[in-house]
């Protein structure tokens, strides 16, 4: 079936069986990607299924507003993402990692220092790339489990290349508020990736020590 904007606009105008058939094809060809994205954020296939189904209902209800400009799959994907953000917003907020001034709390800072000290104590240890990837994956999974909304937005920025204007539209925030939120996402991520950063740092040469050695020769 033709999944172009013109074909979708025609299906929307015809309604009934035409739009139903069109959406079945979309679900067959793109549904798995929508489910994976929702499941990664929600950490629940059941909740992901509910989000995607709710999004498809919204697509059905709003199809008349599509004007045939741009990619209809991208338009549908945006509705899925809005629905996912709504689901994440309904979850109970997590305990804050930042204090009132926007800095990491004392407890988090202590945990970061402990991880860094334990890694730096063995600077000779060289971790293979696949080991670092496993640590990174574990850090991200913990971050996503405890801060799913922030992890989802960072995944869109880093993995999918969405820019601030894309995130602004998804979050329905002003440009300034969007920049601040993305900054908050990065701040929240820092303590979760402390282990990975410390291991990377432990495997790098000490520039200061190297400089002293060069000057001593």
Image: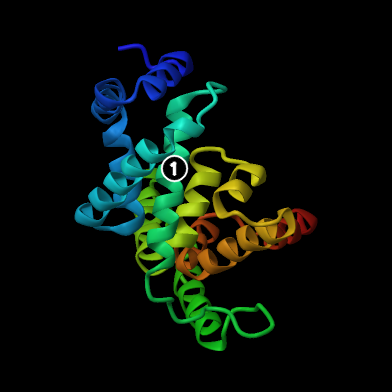
Q: Identify the residue position indicated by label 1 in the image.
A: 79
Residue 127 higher or lower than 18, as above or below: below
Residue 100, horizontal then vertical, whole percent = 65, 85
Residue 100 higher or lower than 35, as above or below: below
The quarter of the displayed image where residue 98 is located: bottom right
Residue at image position (46%, 58%) is: 151
The furthest residue to the right? 215
Q: How many marks?
A: 1
Q: Is residue 133 left or right of residue 208?
A: left
Q: Quadrant of the C terminus?
A: bottom right
The quarter of the displayed image where residue 16 is located: top left
Residue at image position (55%, 49%) is: 170
Circle 1 sits in a helix, a strand or a loop, which is it?
A: helix
Residue at image position (51%, 72%) is: 116
From the viewer's side, name the closer residue of 150 and 103: 150
Question: Looking at the image, what colour scheme do you see?
Answer: rainbow
From the viewer's side, name the closer residue of 21 and 166: 21
The quarter of the displayed image where residue 106 is located: bottom right
Residue 194, horizontal then vertical, whole percent = 49, 67
Q: Quadrant of the N terminus?
A: top left
Rate crowding at label 1 as few (under 14), some (14 to 19) or many (20 or more) other CA atoms within 10 Å.
Answer: many
The furthest residue to the left? 46
Residue at image position (38%, 46%) is: 128
From the viewer's side, name the closer residue of 9 and 217: 9
Residue 86, horizontal then vertical, whole percent = 43, 59
Residue 137, horizontal then vertical, whole percent = 36, 53
The furthest residue to the bottom? 106
Q: Is residue 72 left or right of residue 14?
A: right
């Amino acid at each position: 079936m033709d999944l172009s904007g013109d074909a979708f606009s025609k299906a929307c105008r015809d309604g009934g069986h035409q739009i139903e058939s069109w959406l079945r094809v979309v679900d067959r060809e793109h549904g798995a990607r929508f489910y994976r994205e929702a499941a990664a954020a929600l950490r629940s296939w059941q909740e992901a299924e509910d989000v995607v189904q709710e999004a498809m209902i919204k697509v059905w209800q709003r199809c008349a507003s599509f004007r045939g400009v741009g990619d209809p799959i991208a338009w549908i994907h945006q509705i899925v993402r809005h629905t996912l953000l709504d689901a994440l917003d309904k979850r109970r907020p997590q305990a804050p990692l930042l204090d009132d001034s926007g800095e990491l709390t004392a407890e988090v800072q202590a945990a970061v220092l402990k991880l860094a000290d334990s890694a730096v104590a063995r600077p000779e240890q060289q971790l293979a790339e696949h080991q670092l990837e496993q640590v990174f994956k574990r850090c991200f999974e913990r971050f996503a489990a405890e801060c799913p909304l922030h992890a989802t937005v960072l995944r869109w920025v880093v993995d999918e290349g969405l820019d601030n204007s894309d995130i602004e539209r998804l979050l329905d925030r002003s440009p300034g508020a969007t920049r601040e939120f993305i900054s908050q996402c990065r701040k929240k991520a820092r303590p979760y990736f402390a282990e990975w950063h410390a291991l990377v740092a432990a495997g790098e040469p000490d520039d200061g020590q190297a400089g002293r050695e060069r000057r001593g020769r």
